[in-house]
Image (cartoon, helix red, strand yellow):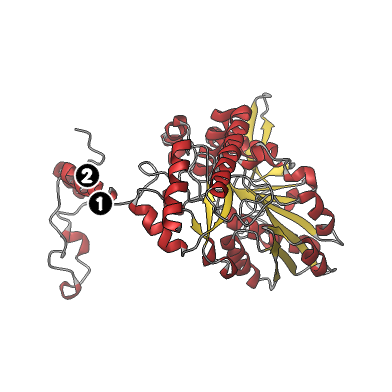
Amino acid sequence: MLHRYLPMTEEDKQEMLKTIGVQSIDELFSDIPESVRFNRDYNIKKAKSESELMKELTALAEKNMHMKKHPSFLGAGVYDHYIPAIVDHVISRSEFYTAYTPYQPEISQGELQAIFEFQTMICELTGMDVANSSMYDGGTALAEAALLSAGHTKNKKVLVSKAVHPEYRDVLKTYAKGPGLEVVEIPFKNGVTDLEALQAEMDEQVACVIVQYPNFFGQIEPLKEIEPIAHTGKSMFVVASNPLALGILTPPGTFGADIVVGDVQPFGIPAQFGGPHCGYFAVKSALMRKIPGRLVGQTTDEEGRRGFVLTLQAREQHIRRDKATSNICSNQALNALAASVAMTALGKRGVKEMAIMNIQKAHYAKNAFVEHGFDVPFTGPFFNEFVVKLNKSVKEVNKRLLEKGIIGGYDVGRDYPELENHMLVAVTELRTKEEIDTFVKELGDCHA
């Protein structure tokens, strides 16, 4: 049978002890007094064979409600999307799976090229000039964008739409405490940022305006109308965006965004209990030297051969760290690689088709809810998520849906008290017509 782990043999152990010049394992701890040593067996269950252990762990895992077995309509930042089979194959290769930071470019060309391709594809999707080698997740990328804006404009006021993901806003508030930034939340109206309220908050102290596109409710923010407001005075325009949606939506760069951030989880990264993820950070060329984290650049060697190097690393653990623009310590190289492989496998046409399928299926679901008498409060254009009003608590309804083998939507009332009993429903390309119809029917029965 396949053994995933082969411990050292007794012969291996004796050989190592002989090499270091001791007779036994106990001799290694001779300097520790007997009175403080642990001299009894651990109070744990007796070890099992690998096959017995796998059966036990599999039985425990099967108690979970997972998306391989049950249709999921839960989104809110983590989505159930198609992942090409080649993604796992590539990221499981040892040269990628065990790679950390490619400090030595001469032996890390594959890793550096993969990151360079990631940066290039992010720029194509967002319509921006430069992207970094990835960040921890979408929330930290957004907070870093606010810090960059404050440093660049020398202003301390950050305006963020309440239609931005609640967890992103929480991360922003945490980041803002250190440099003493003032975070002002702009209310939403009909599911999108209230432009009148935004205009009223604009003054000479604003460092940036932050919106999400599509926003937390799945609605498409009117970036063309927001941009001139956001660029009042020295203020900068920051857009957090779902990269899959950018396969069909006009990119934020076209609307004059200064910084575009987001999370590439929709490309090749499974839900896996909510993490780890991979954030992206893209800017206009004027901000290139202030971008947090790393950039991978393309160059040529002495013989004219194409090569890749890390560049513009003004970070806390490098030289010039007093001028570092961020305390971000690493990048999500493995997850960035997964996203790159997924985007490459799908191609431009595939990404667009996948985005269109999300729109079509989500709109089919919304229309089905309306036909069944549900109130869908926000009427504007949306991507693959929308909000539905229920007559009962979302927690109670989701519990009953689980009993039917369906993973329901997100309880919006957890973050927006004014939207109590509202469910955020996500419909991706993986949901079938039959699954959508069953979900609407079952939700109707729970809702009644």
Q: Position of residue 413 (x, y in %)?
A: 53, 65
Residue of label 1? 60
SS assignment at label 2: helix
Picture residue at 42% right of the left edge, 31% below the top: 89
Picture residue at 54% right of the left edge, 67% below the top: 420
* Residue 317 appears in the figure: no
Left or right? Give the position of 337 relative to 9. right
Picture residue at 25% right of the left edge, 51% below the top: 60
- Mark 2: which amino acid? Met
Q: Give the answer, above or below, for where 48 lies relative to 233.
A: above
Residue density around tag 2, few if under 14, some if 14–19, many if 20 or more, within 10 Å: few
Residue density around tag 1, few if under 14, some if 14–19, many if 20 or more, within 10 Å: few
What residue occupies the far right of the structure in this picture?
Answer: 233
Label 1 to label 2: alpha-carbon separation: 10 Å
Q: Quadrant of the C terminus?
A: bottom left
Residue of label 2? 54
Q: Nearer the viewer, residue 261 or 15?
A: 261
| Snapshot quadrant of residue 141 | bottom right
| Snapshot quadrant of residue 378 | bottom right
SS assignment at label 1: helix
Q: Nearer the viewer, mark 1 or mark 2?
A: 1
